[in-house]
Amino acid sequence: MNEEKWGILYCPKSGIWNSPKKRWERIERSLQAHGIDYDFVQSENSGSVDRLVKMLISNGYKTLVIVGGDSALNDAVNCLMQIDQQKRDEIALGVVPNGMMNDFAHFWEFKEDDLDQTIGWLKQHRIRKIDLGCIRYTNKQGEKCRRYFLNCINIGLVATIMNLRRQTRHYFGSRTLSFLFSFILMIFQRLEYKMHLKINADEVKRKVMTVCIGNAPGYGQTPNAVPYNGLLDVSVVYHPEMTQLIEGIYLFVRGKFLNHRSVHPYRTQKVDVLKADHAMVGIDGRMMNTPVGEFTVSVEQEVVNFLIPS
């Protein structure tokens, strides 16, 4: 195996306006123009990503490039965290944004429409050790589980909205339209949940609308979080009045989410969720099976090699 050869996993973007074949042809032309030596596999669906990433790792590729979104990246880092540290330290992970949600790629200024710039940056092989968040929980079968995340975990209303956003974007094909339509559908959703949280020395025991625990900007809810300081940013949002809710949506769209009076920000290494009755949980934009009982979210420092821009 040529250790400089890339192992590329192509996750086609679904939607009525997307042509996976034409998208790959554009990517292929850019790879050839940059003289990249690579092999690639294509996922059939989201359930096949985990299997294909494991295959690329077991076949000895030292540079793994995911052509996909946050969910595919999430699968990739969870596969990497299943191997021993010595082997993981030999592998670099890169991304060409191509999913329904590409917020982690956007944090590093990778853009969907600038393939040449993205592949040029990846070719330079500039590596940064990044942190991962980790949720430890018990599933419905009583098994102790863990799941890692790059971007964030949402608990409550925003997890529901993110799920609606993912579903509606399949039809609209537009990030903005699907997001706005999801907010409209929010009217029909439960708006608050009884929660009991421990964050540093503080204890939150009350009705809460949503909680975001971010290792990165968290889809705008933890805008100051970065995946390399060994800390998680947490935004706890109490249930605002309707006028405050409208104001909150406006501030969220403007990138000033933390300025809202109902948002209570924290910075920590660990969050204990002792109670979150009936609240949905999303991880990197994908719904996960709701944990049974208490669960813990923490950060693990500098555990994955990530290819970043020059």
Image (cartoon, helix red, strand yellow):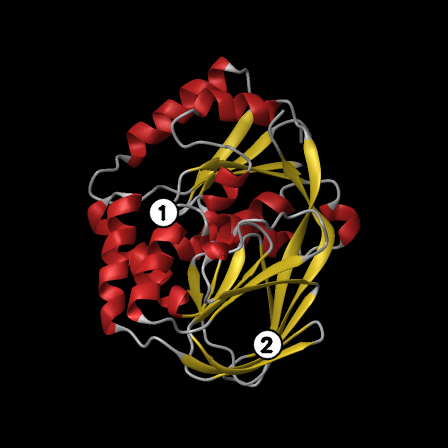
**Helix or strand or loop: what does disc 2 sit on?**
strand
- At 51% from the left edge and 78% from the top edge, which residue is drawn? 291
Question: The disc labelled 2 sits on which kind of residue?
Answer: Tyr
Q: Which residue is mark 2?
A: 137
In this rendering, the count of numbered labels is 2
Q: Which residue is mark 1?
A: 100
Label 2 packing within 10 angstroms: few (<14), some (14-19), many (20+): many
Residue occupying the far right of the picture: 86
- Tell me the quadrant of the picture where the C terminus can be found: top right
Where residue 9 sits: x, y (%)? Answer: 48, 40
Which corner quadrant of the image does residue 18 belong to? top left
Where residue 300 sits: x, y (%)? Answer: 71, 58
Residue 23 in view (yes/no): yes
Question: The disc labelled 1 sits on which kind of residue?
Answer: Met
Where residue 180 sits: x, y (%)? Answer: 26, 53
Which corner quadrant of the image does residue 188 belong to? bottom left
